[in-house]
Amino acid sequence: MTAEAEDDRTSSNNAKGADQTDQTEETDRGNETETETEADEYDEDSIIDHTTFDQLLEMDDEEDHEFSRSLVWNYFEQAEKTFEDMNESMKRLDFPDLSRLGHFLKGSSAALGLTKVKESCEQLQHYGNRKDATGANIITNDEAERLIRALLTQMRSEYDEAESYLKDFYDGQEP
């Protein structure tokens, strides 16, 4: 990791630490009130593989992360289209197409280090091929349909979480 990428990550983490200090979690036993910290909002390590994402940040020429930000925003557009295609394929119960779309989104999610989305896409690949989550055992069409329906909801939630995290990282600035 370059010193510049490490500095960017350290600054980001230091800023988060300051936010956590300013917004400590409060629990009032009588009223059961809580103030969420930014760290509570994201389970950062389960959302993103920092080794992969930091390698992407190292490719940025400038501190404004123009290159990596453009890749991330292109991913958002690609993922939205892929989710639309998945919904259409699900309506037709087109299992091979769902497997193909899972494979496609898995690759771009892995390139950004989006761990949860990548893992769910891999499961979708298997279910679309009418295999269990490991890809080792055959499942019925009915079972594949049931598993895929639940997985698409989960994947969308994981994607939304990753999108929110990345937009926060880039301060919402589009390329």
Image (tube, rainbow, N blue to C red):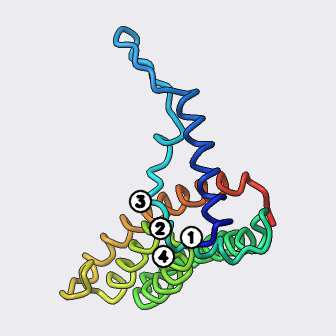
Answer with mark 3 or mark 1, whichever residue precedes in sequence.
3
Label 2–label 4 contact, CB within 8 A: no
- Which residue shows up at 54% across the image and 60% down it? 162
Identify the residue position indicated by label 4 in the image.
Answer: 91
Identify the residue position indicated by label 3 in the image.
Answer: 46
- The picture places residue 147, in percent across and down from the top left corner, at 31, 71
Identify the residue position indicated by label 1 in the image.
Answer: 53
In the image as oriented, which residue stretches furthest toward the front?
3
Comparing labels 4 and 1, the label whose residue is closer to the camera: 1
Q: CA distance from mark 3 to mark 1?
A: 13 Å
Identify the residue position indicated by label 2 in the image.
Answer: 49
Q: Quadrant of the N terminus?
A: bottom right
Horizontally, residue 31 falls left or right of residue 107, namely left
In the image as oriented, which residue stretches furthest toward the left?
137
- Which residue shows up at 80% across the image and 69% down it? 62
Label 3–label 4 contact, CB within 8 A: no
Q: CA distance from mark 1 to mark 2?
A: 6 Å
Residue situated in front as seen by the camera: 165 or 127: 165
